[in-house]
Amino acid sequence: MSNLEAMSPDPSQPADSASTSPAGLAADPPDPGAADPAAIASGAAANDTIFGRILRGEIPCDAVYADDLCLAFRDVNPQAPVHVLVIPREALVNLGDAGRQHRELLGHLLLVAAKVARQEGLEGWRTVINSGAEAGQTVFHLHVHVIGGRPLSWPPG
């Protein structure tokens, strides 16, 4: 499957945009407290991390999924045969900076992580969110790691 196909809505899903999101997932009514697209765009413009530069198109990535809320692409330093990062378009440092207004976005990121894992052919996978330098976060823009394609031991690290 090409990256363009992966970024397109699922053709088996209804075309009614009121009932599904761009990810082909059931859409909820708009949240009046949610960030508007202009705020998301200005957040990407102000984000000086490598992920901000990827979102602005300044650095290429191997995208596997994209919608209006997030982008998923292959990690350049994979820790497993499948290692994809799902990042919000909105500038958000980590879970510690998330508030109630991010509830829908955070749920969306996890649903996209599962969609990407299945799209990559995984039956089992690990999702990881590092929050803060002490936890191993090296890029200070929230991201969900989707890791799989080999047996994963526990505990990690």
Image: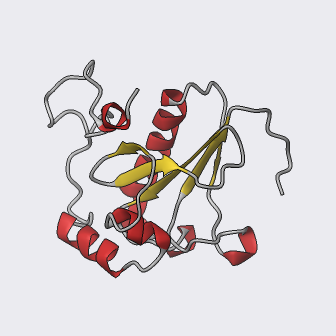
Whole-percent x and y of residue 28?
26, 43
Q: Nearer the viewer, residue 7 or 34?
A: 7
Q: Quadrant of the C terminus?
A: bottom right
Q: Nearer the viewer, residue 43 or 77?
A: 77
Query: Quadrant location of residue 10?
Result: top left
Say whether residue 30 is left or right of residue 130: left
Q: Identify the residue at image location x=69%, y=76%.
A: 133
Q: Identify the residue at image location x=37%, y=37%.
A: 3
Say whether residue 77 is left or right of residue 35: right
Q: Residue furthest top?
A: 12
**Picture colour scheme:** secondary structure
Depicted 39 relative to depicted 64: above or below: below
Whole-percent x and y of residue 15?
15, 26
Q: Identify the residue at image location x=14%, y=37%.
A: 18
Say whether residue 85 is left or right of residue 102: right
Depicted 2 relative to depicted 94: above or below: above
Q: Nearer the viewer, residue 25 or 4?
A: 4
Q: Quadrant of the N terminus?
A: top left
Say whether residue 65 is left or right of residue 93: left
Depicted 81 relative to depicted 118: above or below: below
Whole-percent x and y of residue 63?
42, 46
Query: Quadrant location of residue 6?
Result: top left
Q: How many marks?
A: 0
